[in-house]
Image (cartoon, helix red, strand yellow):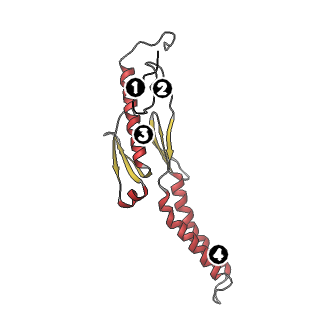
């Protein structure tokens, strides 16, 4: 049996009855533009430490300056970076997976075969950066919200294609087409 032809560069479908392997389509994090303030804070703290080190008034000592700088860097730089780094979104040929959490990992999955609506929202700054927010809702579960998606139009198109292909495969396999010779499940 030959592979079905595809239109518009969509992924090829396996022959009827053959298992479709799960493949990675995209893996990404939210847009890193919010970390810009963290970078400014890091440069400001480094500049302030360089200026005030060995130049403090009498009751203060250098270790106090360094402790305050470390606390500011922890709160304004390290924690926002870890929060950004811990949130990943994965799109495969079967599902969308949202994972978050630094110490305790939380994972949420939404299969393409069930179908879902995709809502794209973009603010003014998000349009300037090419980002946006995606809300995936299947009407049963709580909507999956993906915030600050980089290249949101490309991700939206990939999700639409994956939902369409998954529903076509699910419908085709539910029709009970005969299996190719020698490929009968047992």
Q: Is 156 placed above or below 41 here?
A: above
- Residue indicated by mark 4: 66
- Residue indicated by mark 1: 169
Instruction: Find residue 158 and name its label.
Output: 3
- Could you tell me which residue is drawn at 45 percent across and 27 percent down? 12
Mark 4 Cα shell of 10 Å, populated few (<14), some (14-19), many (≥20): some
Q: Earlier in the sequence, mark 4 or mark 2?
A: 2
Q: Is 99 placed above or below 166 here?
A: below
SS at circle 2: loop
Task: Compute the Cα span from label 4 to label 3.
Answer: 48 Å
Residue 43 in the image: x percent, y percent?
58, 71
- Marks 3, 1: nearer the viewer: 3
Image quadrant in which you'd find residue 139 = top left
Instruction: Find residue 20 and name its label.
Output: 2
Comparing 15 with 64, the one in front is 15
SS at circle 1: helix
Residue 10 in the image: x percent, y percent?
42, 32
Residue 22 in the image: x percent, y percent?
50, 31
- Marks 2, 3: nearer the viewer: 3
Task: Compute the Cα span from label 3 to label 1.
Answer: 16 Å
For this view, does 64 lie left or right of residue 91? right
Q: Count of labels shown?
A: 4
**What is the residue that sits farthest to the left in this orientation?**
139
Cβ–Cβ under 8 Å for marks 2 and 1: yes
- Could you tell me which residue is drawn at 45 percent across and 13 percent down? 179
**What is the residue that sits farthest to the top in this orientation?**
181
Mark 1 Cα shell of 10 Å, populated few (<14), some (14-19), many (≥20): many
Q: Earlier in the sequence, mark 4 or mark 3?
A: 4
């Amino acid at each position: 049996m030959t592979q079905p032809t595809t239109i518009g560069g969509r992924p090829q479908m396996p022959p009827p009855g053959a298992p479709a392997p799960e493949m990675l389509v995209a893996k990404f994090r939210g847009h890193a533009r919010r970390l810009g303030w963290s970078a400014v804070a890091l440069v400001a703290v480094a500049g302030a430490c360089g200026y005030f080190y060995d130049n403090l008034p009498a009751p203060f000592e250098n270790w106090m300056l360094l402790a305050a700088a470390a606390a500011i860097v922890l709160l304004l730089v390290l924690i926002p970076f870890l929060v950004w780094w811990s949130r990943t979104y994965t799109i495969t040929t079967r599902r969308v997976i949202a994972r978050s959490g630094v110490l305790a990992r939380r994972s949420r999955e939404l299969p393409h075969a069930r179908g879902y609506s995709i809502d794209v929202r973009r603010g003014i700054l998000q349009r300037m950066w090419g980002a946006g927010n995606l809300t995936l809702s299947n009407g049963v579960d709580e909507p999956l919200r993906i915030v600050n998606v980089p290249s949101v139009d490309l991700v939206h198109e990939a999700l639409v294609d994956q939902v369409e292909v998954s529903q076509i495969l699910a419908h085709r396999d539910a029709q009970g087409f005969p299996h190719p010779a020698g490929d009968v499940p047992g």
